Image (cartoon, rainbow, N blue to C red):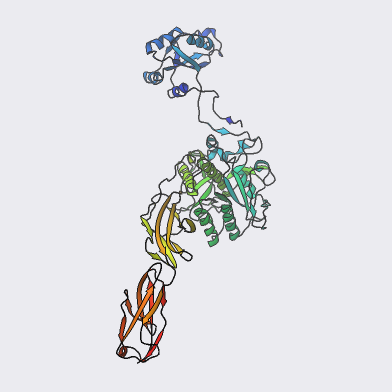
Amino acid sequence: MKLTKRRVTVGLISTAVVVSMTSVTTWALAADDAKSMSAAANTPVSLVVGYKTGIDRVASTRSLSSAGLRTADAATAQSALAEINASRVTVSSGRIASVIASLRNDPNVAYVEKDVQLAEFDTVPNDPSFSKQNEMYAVKAPKAWDTTKGSAVTVAVVDTGVNAIKDLAGATVAGYDFVNDDSSPADDRGHGTSVAALIAARGNNKQGMAGVCWSCKIMPVKVLDNKGNGSGSDVAQGIIWAVKHGARIINLSLGGPGSKVLQDAVAYANVNNALVVAAAGNAGNTTPQYPAAYTDVLTVAATKRCASYATTPGCTAGHQTLTSYSSRNKSGASWVDVAAVGDVMTMDRYGNYNTGTSGTSFSAPIVSGVAALVKTRNPSYTGWSIASSIYKSASVRKVAGVNYGLVDASIALNVPTDRTAPTATGITPNGGFAKGSIPVRPVNFKDDKSGIQKSLLYVNGVYKNYSKNAPYGIIFNTAGYKGRTTVELRISDKAGNQKIVKGVVTVDNTAPVTKITSAPKSGTKVKGTVTIKFSGTDATAGMGKWVLLINGKASQSRTVLKPFTFAASSVPKSFTVQVRGYDKAGNSSNSVKLTYTR
């Protein structure tokens, strides 16, 4: 695919020339009959002259002199290129052929080549409407495209549906319609298609526009009807469905009041390492909107180009300031994170390309597209890592009213993530016996960077459950297990680093056998000292103790097989006697019940 580069001189560059460009110096003509040349012939052309190994400065100067050239460089500039046995000279275009021929015939010269001009690359696609997409330049998408144009990263557009036409043809994966409960999430309003086009309209295809991530996949999840309305539960279902079907970036260009189901759905996405990107809202005030204001949501405000960088209050180095309609942080608040242009050009549901589309709904997908580029560049990044990259990129160009600033895609691609695993000294329980349902907890755990995200419980290597809340303990139901059992917690931070702590318990859910082996005959009258002998066996944990029950209440206990004795005068006139045996795991059983009078 051929791309157009802005401000780039095309040409092959040898290693020597690339190094030589670290010092831009000038050699001048020693003799040049300007009067005999036309203006065109006087156009200066730079040459790089390389000298053979072992050629000293005197010999190189002699070679230049014989070609009618001399140096006009400062000493520092000369010495820089001298490190690689090279010089840069400037000749008129009218003399270039003769000079090159003369130098190539010099036994001291290794090569002569035209100097090239280098500049930073900005990839410009050939889409006819791209010239109207100033929003892409504001987030430096063209510069990012020199590194990556995306991959098959899946971005879920949880919205009014998506029509996969024109620039979105072939760009979608299977989705779902929660409004009509079917698998055809067509867009009957247009909002979702416009959002999707900003994320993933196919670039450089000679039609329409270019999205931020040319090769990304859009997962259309319809949760809003043809009037743009939907329930919190449908949105929650859409988020969960998207995550379960492989989306790792979720775009939510919608909002309203908060709800527990929506909050839990966002948390579900977070704990499964997906990034939720949400529009801040168009209220033009500081009132939090949801889901934008939930924890671990990347919230996007809308900007416009400053009328005057010098005189517009709050105008950033990126020549952007918040629009009047964009929601924002008030002093001390932090729910709005970054900003991107809110007045955009995009594609409607019929395949028409329109400028003047406005709202934070269209700022958010620009950032979702940047997130997809970051994920392409760094496939192992979690949602937290992607968000962290975007936050750091935006910190360079501050915007009043948001935590960080204007997103910079080119910087975001190369921000490193947290690579340090959480720490923990152990797990409880570890050793001993267990029965029933027991809490399994990490001991002395912490993470000083991205923060703890979740713990996963594995029993004998098999996943059982997870916890996303401190202290990250998980209940283990030991039913169905017996004997030596390995329990482990896999503690993950938000960047995906993991610490594994293991323990071993002996599971015993089987009650021991407890017997009274010698006692007065049941139903008889007793007097004086009554002696009760007993026994107990347990095949797994072993016996721990025995308790004498008189009328069902504990009277005495033993940890050894020493008979219980009591005075008949110390008990009620009519009473019962049992022995309860406990094994070391805490299971118990009762002997037969004996009845007496005195």
Left or right: residue 153 versus residue 15 is right
Looking at the rendered image, the quarter that the C terminus falls into is: bottom left
- Residue at 38% x, 13% y is 57
Left or right: residue 561 versus residue 419 is left
Pinpoint residue 502: horizontal percent, then vertical percent: 40, 56
Decide which of 496, 124 is in the foreground and name it: 496
Above or below residue 230? Residue 251 is above
Decide which of 538, 113 is in the foreground and name it: 538
| Residue 559 falls in image quadrant | bottom left
Looking at the rendered image, the quarter that the N terminus falls into is: top right
| Residue 555 falls in image quadrant | bottom left
Pinpoint residue 588: horizontal percent, then vertical percent: 41, 74
Pinpoint residue 103: horizontal percent, then vertical percent: 48, 10
Count of numbered circles on the image: 0
Farthest residue, direction right: 350
Tell me if I can see residue 528 in this picture: yes
Decide which of 332, 506 is in the foreground and name it: 506
Decide which of 575, 443 is in the foreground and name it: 575
Above or below residue 456? Residue 125 is above
Tell me if I can see residue 288 in this picture: no
Left or right: residue 408 versus residue 441 is right
Pinpoint residue 366: horizontal percent, then vertical percent: 56, 44
Above or below residue 261? Residue 317 is above
